């Protein structure tokens, strides 16, 4: 790489002021960075680090006057961005600097066709007839590898998949060969296999055009996959920056080390000695179809098979991972075995009784034995209840004395490493990770035979994720819990699961001991999944440091 | 080095304090609160302002305002004091507004909760009924009901409640449909909580805030409906009512326009206070929507 | 599309049947029937005559028999006879329909277009002085009872200034033709239309303002900004169409309320429309006519709702009618 080339972007000492009453005065405090042509600079940080606002500042699209530039300079190809008029900026945006966003589902106007939106950027910045623009648009759709560009051109955003929408966004961003591309978490909302394709695509297009890329992410795996240069942000301050190899493999700052150490290792746990533990949960021949509506107003219903003939066994003290991408039916599995959804057929034997054949009254009693930890820490706790009531609710429903249940709830809070002083607070007063701990305490309060965990750490920042995973692992060995663990994240699965089942389109394509599946995947889909894990060739160096 | 996740944030002040802080940020809502307080004060002090019957003759008919100190707002064509009627009218407006709103919200919650929670054929039947009620122009239905039931104040209130439950029912239904699949409801169900507890203890408290905000709209509409009825001469003749005053003032519009203007302004300010109150409640209860 | 339309109209039939049965039974609850009202008007009659009248109108049968007879006639669109006008109800209704439709179409078009324009205008300057003035005016009009607004306009424009006629749809014994007739009717409609549209305008204004503010915050608007689109382009090409959708829904939902609002305004301005007829039928206990009005209004409301749904589907590319 040519380090002598004039930088495309140079930011020096940038400070962004937050409105009064925010938790800190500056969203960004003294950001320095340089992006050279043909270089990918990754800005890494957890939520609240100020990484997305820095992109807004460069585009001059900050939510002013709430957040505004309080100092520093931004130079783009030798021009001072901050002194440009709004009209001059409009010529820059989409033309010389362009941007890709996180949410492909909402980033496109639902009322306009893909072609119209692609054409808009061309119309705004390019002199040329409709015919020339159309040809350019089709060419771009081809370059981002969209099958059948002509029909994609005429499609509305809701008619194409999330991955394709992100491709359209990229086509739009690169249509005029910008000098700088800002990508704000462009793959976070996508499945791993799609993520890898999109990362490769950004790489490929950027190399042909020689643009500089500022890539914002929270995921060190992605960094390892794509970065030339890395900047680590924490609470608005740069804690470390340097070439990718140096930051990834020889981090210096303790925060960087801690973040890297929180990335779950891809090495699965060693095989446990096989003891004949009793089977606590057994699913046989489970099947679930949903009637999906065709159009919103048309009454036509076509069936979608979410889970197709699923069988599994879970032994006492074992953790079984259910792994798959979105649409694989893994979440449906968690709802079927807890009978939050009714299966079309099959049985779920819990301690010898078929849960699916229970009467409503029997079912309510049986629920005690199979508890669940949910995905969304915001939505899984009733916002109008105090934490102690949330945890004690289950035992009270099952006839426990309320005072005893409340005492027990406080003990459980301690068990999940939260202060019992928090018992009388409401859920919104806790962070995401803490809420997940409360969710775990709620499940434990019932002393269940089985806990079903549906993506319990996917909404959490990586350092928090590591702590919650560690807590789960500790509790599991202390209480000999049996876990059915649903996740899309193979790194997380590798950390926690003894055995895994890989699901694709409602079917289990492969299952076995985690170590064996990881070492020697049999099914093509599993192989693809494993090889798509971002940063799979990178082994984080500082395993010894404790995540906390 | 990282923040240890089990550390707690500082405790927040109690809920009502937070509520008031968010409410008072909206200055228009504060004005609404003041107007509302004035209307309540008028209703409460009506007996003190004029201990007698507001519908009796209190002075020379058609005295202009600010002439006779005994009747500061003047008198109408029957010599009744405009001010006493105004104060007693505040009672009627508030009473009808509050009770009719309670009736409509109650019906709305029951219909909406069952339709939204159970879905399927329960929803189909309840929604057909709601549609039927929504299809008849509400004021025509109100006239019909009052014609059948008679013009007693209880029946008028009941009729207003009956014609205005459909909107809250649809709102409650929509809230329930979105909340019933929320994870915390699944969590409670998975603890073995019964359907009735799920509906009334888990979902309803979370569905209430928008309904409470909407209650201010219904209250405003109820007052408007009552005054329109009274204006058309279908109100309860035994009570002083703002709509009634305007209706009777119409006959003397040319000479004594204040007889209709004063109660008219009272209606506008009262309804305005409810709308502003509703906006403030919305800001305070749905903090995410603030700018 | 055709299949969808047919199915929608088919689904409306049970709703109308429900309404008519409900109204019929409700009206039978009322103390006294048409015959009582007639006899009351005549100042009393002997019992045998009353019985004869009852038998003549079929009122001596049980409620269920009467209901059955009424519904059977309704199925062939026979709405019966108006006791007050001594004409078929259908004739009375058709005579009145034009006035109400005219009033409704003009005031709705005015309210919808101006309300939407003002709402969008205010939203683009959210929280500025202009926005505050527009929003406050909107709230005040929202809080004003239509009859009060009508009276005050009458006081100002008819009584004090003498510009506009106090009521009616045309000058009595004016016998205007052609353009003169048109202007005469227009002059009569100015105030009623203004009263209705000012109040409904405030609905659309408030709705559109919040809708535009909401859409402006969405991701795709940010995308368009990042593409270099200016504020005007954002508004015309990205925000408006998305923000219009809730307004269209409200248009359909509020149509029945607006029809109801015409009762008060038509009564005040003595416009010979359906609203005034409804009020008179209630006062005169002309039950057949009242039933007829409810039947006709329901059909109009259902038709308008159906049309707004079609419009919505056209505006929202996510919806496909099949």
Image: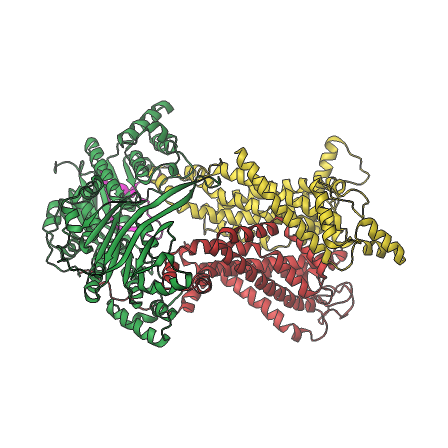
Chain colours: A green, B red, C yellow
Q: Can the viewer see residue A24 in this picture?
A: no
Q: Is residue B139 magenta?
A: no
Which quarter of the figure has residue A479? bottom left
| Residue at x-position 44% and y-position 61% | B203
Above/below status of C151 relative to A202: below
Instruction: List x then y, in percent, for residue A381.
Output: 35, 61
In depth, the one of A397 and B102 nearer the eye is: A397
Front residue of B121/C13: it is: B121
Residue A3: image quadrant is top left
Horizontal arrangement in the rendering, residue C270 relative to residue A223 (left or right): right
Image coordinates for residue A522, horizontal then vertical, percent = 18, 42
- Which stretch is magenta? A59-86
Residue A516 appears at what percent x and percent y? 15, 48
Relative to B67, is A402 on the left or the right?
left
Position of residue A220 in the picture relative to residue B42 (left or right): left
Magenta-drawn stretch contains A83:
yes
The residue shown at (37%, 74%) is A402
Residue B55 in sight: yes
Q: Is residue B264 above or below residue C219?
A: below
B103, B274: nearer the viewer: B103
Q: Position of residue A292 (x, y in %)?
A: 41, 43
């Amino acid at each position: 790489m040519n380090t002598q080339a004039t930088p495309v972007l140079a930011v020096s000492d940038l400070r962004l002021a937050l409105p009064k009453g925010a938790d800190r005065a500056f969203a960004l405090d003294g950001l320095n960075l340089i992006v050279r042509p043909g270089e990918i600079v990754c800005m890494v940080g957890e939520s609240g680090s100020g990484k997305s606002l820095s992109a807004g500042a460069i585009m001059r699209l900050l939510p002013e006057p709430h957040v505004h530039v309080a100092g520093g300079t931004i130079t783009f190809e030798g021009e001072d961005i901050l002194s440009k008029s709004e009209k001059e900026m409009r010529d820059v945006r989409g033309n010389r600097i362009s941007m890709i966003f996180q949410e492909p589902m909402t980033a496109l106007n639902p009322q306009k066709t893909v072609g119209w939106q692609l054409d808009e950027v061309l119309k705004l910045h390019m002199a040329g007839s409709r015919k020339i623009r159309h040809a350019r648009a089709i060419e771009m759709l081809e370059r981002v590898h969209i099958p059948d560009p002509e029909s994609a051109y005429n499609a509305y955003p809701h008619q194409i998949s999330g991955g394709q929408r992100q491709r359209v966004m990229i086509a739009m961003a690169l249509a005029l060969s910008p000098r700088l591309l800002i990508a704000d978490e462009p793959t976070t909302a996508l499945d791993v296999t799609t993520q890898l394709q999109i990362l490769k695509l950004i790489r490929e297009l950027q190399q042909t055009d020689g643009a500089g890329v500022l890539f914002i992410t929270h995921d060190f795996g992605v960094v390892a996959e794509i970065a030339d240069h890395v900047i680590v942000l924490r609470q608005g301050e740069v804690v470390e920056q340097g070439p990718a190899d140096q930051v990834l493999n020889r981090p210096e700052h303790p925060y960087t080390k801690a973040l890297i150490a929180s990335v779950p290792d891809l090495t699965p746990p060693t095989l446990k000695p096989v003891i004949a533990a009793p089977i606590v949960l057994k699913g046989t021949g489970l099947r679930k179809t949903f009637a999906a509506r065709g159009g919103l107003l048309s009454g036509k219903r076509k069936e979608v098979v979410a889970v197709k003939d699923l069988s599994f066994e879970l032994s006492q003290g074992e953790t079984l991972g259910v792994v798959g991408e979105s649409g694989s039916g893994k979440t449906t599995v968690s709802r079927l075995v807890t009978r939050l959804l009714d299966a079309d057929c099959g049985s779920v034997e819990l301690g010898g009784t078929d849960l699916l054949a229970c009467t409503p009254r029997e079912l309510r009693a049986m629920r005690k034995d199979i508890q669940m930890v949910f995905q969304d820490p915001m939505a899984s706790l009733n916002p109008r209840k105090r934490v102690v009531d949330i945890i004690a609710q289950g035992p009270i429903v099952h006839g426990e004395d309320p005072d005893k249940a409340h005492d027990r709830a406080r003990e459980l809070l301690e068990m999940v490493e939260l202060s019992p002083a928090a018992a009388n607070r409401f859920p919104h007063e806790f962070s995401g990770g803490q809420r997940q701990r409360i969710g775990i305490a709620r499940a434990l309060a019932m002393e269940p035979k089985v806990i079903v965990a549906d993506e319990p750490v996917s909404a959490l920042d990586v350092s928090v994720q590591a702590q919650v995973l560690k807590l789960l692992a500790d509790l599991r060995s202390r209480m000999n819990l049996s876990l059915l663990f649903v996740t899309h994240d193979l790194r997380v699965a590798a950390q926690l699961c003894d055995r895994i089942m890989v699901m694709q389109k409602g079917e289990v394509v492969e299952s076995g001991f985690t170590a064996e599946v990881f070492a020697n995947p049999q099914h093509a889909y599993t192989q693809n999944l494993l090889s798509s894990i971002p940063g799979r060739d990178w082994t984080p160096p500082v395993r010894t440091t404790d995540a906390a | 080095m990282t923040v240890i996740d089990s550390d707690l944030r500082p405790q927040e002040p109690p809920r009502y304090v937070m509520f008031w802080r968010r409410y008072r940020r909206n200055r228009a809502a504060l004005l609404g609160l003041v107007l509302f307080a004035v209307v309540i004060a008028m209703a409460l002090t009506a007996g003190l302002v004029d201990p007698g019957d507001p519908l009796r003759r209190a002075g020379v008919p058609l005295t202009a305002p600010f002439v006779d100190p005994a009747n500061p707002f003047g008198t109408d064509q029957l010599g009744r004091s405009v001010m006493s009627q105004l104060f007693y009218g505040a009672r009627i407006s508030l009473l009808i507004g509050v009770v009719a709103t309670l009736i409509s919200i109650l019906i709305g919650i029951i219909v909406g909760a069952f339709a939204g929670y159970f879905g399927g054929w329960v929803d189909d039947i309840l929604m057909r009924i709601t549609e039927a009620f929504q299809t008849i122009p509400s004021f025509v239905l109100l006239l019909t009901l009052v014609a059948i039931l008679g013009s007693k104040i209880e029946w008028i209130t009941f009729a207003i409640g009956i014609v205005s439950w459909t909107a809250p029912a649809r709102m409650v239904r929509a809230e329930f449909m979105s909340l019933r699949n929320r994870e915390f409801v699944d969590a409670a169900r998975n603890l073995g909580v019964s359907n009735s507890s799920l509906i009334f203890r888990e979902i309803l408290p979370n569905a209430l805030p928008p309904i409470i905000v909407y209650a201010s709209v219904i209250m405003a509409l109820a007052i408007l409906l009552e005054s329109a009825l009274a204006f058309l001469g279908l109100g309860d003749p035994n009570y002083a009512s703002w709509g009634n005053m305007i209706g009777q003032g119409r006959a003397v519009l040319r000479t004594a326009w204040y007889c209709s203007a004063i109660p008219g302004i009272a209606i506008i300010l009262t309804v305005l206070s409810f709308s502003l109150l509703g906006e403030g409640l919305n800001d305070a209860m749905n903090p995410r929507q603030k700018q | 599309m055709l299949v969808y339309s047919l199915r929608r109209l088919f689904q409306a039939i049970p709703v109308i049947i429900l309404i008519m049965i409900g109204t019929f039974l409700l009206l039978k609850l009322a103390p006294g029937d048409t015959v009582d009202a007639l006899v009351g008007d005549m100042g009393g009659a002997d019992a045998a005559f009353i019985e004869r009248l009852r038998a003549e109108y079929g009122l001596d049968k049980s409620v269920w028999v009467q209901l059955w007879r009424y519904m059977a006639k309704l199925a062939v669109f026979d709405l019966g006879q108006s006791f007050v006008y001594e004409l078929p109800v259908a004739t009375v209704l058709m005579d009145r329909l034009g006035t109400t439709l005219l009033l409704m179409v003009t005031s709705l078009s005015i309210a919808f277009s101006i309300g939407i324009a003002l709402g969008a205008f205010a939203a683009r300057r959210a929280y500025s002085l202009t926005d505050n003035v527009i929003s406050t005016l909107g709230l005040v009009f929202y809080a004003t009872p239509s009859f009060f607004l009508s009276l005050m306009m009458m006081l100002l424009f008819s009584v004090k200034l003498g510009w506009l006629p106090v009521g009616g749809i045309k000058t009595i014994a004016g016998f205007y033709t052609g353009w003169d007739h048109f202007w005469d009717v227009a002059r009569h409609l100015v105030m009623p239309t203004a009263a209705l549209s000012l109040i409904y305008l405030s609905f659309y204004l408030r709705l559109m303002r919040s809708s535009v503010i909401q859409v402006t915050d969405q991701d795709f608007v940010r995308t368009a900004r990042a593409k270099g689109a200016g504020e005007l382009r954002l508004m015309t090409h990205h925000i408006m169409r998305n923000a219009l959708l809730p307004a269209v829904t409200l248009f359909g939902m509020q149509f029945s309320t607006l029809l109801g609002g015409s009762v008060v305004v038509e009564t005040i301005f003595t416009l010979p429309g359906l609203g005034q007829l409804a009020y008179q039928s209630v006062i005169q206990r002309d039950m057949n006519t009242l039933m007829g009005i409810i039947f006709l209004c329901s059909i109009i409301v259902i038709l308008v709702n159906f049309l707004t749904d079609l419009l919505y589907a056209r505006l929202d590319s996510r919806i496909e009618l099949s």
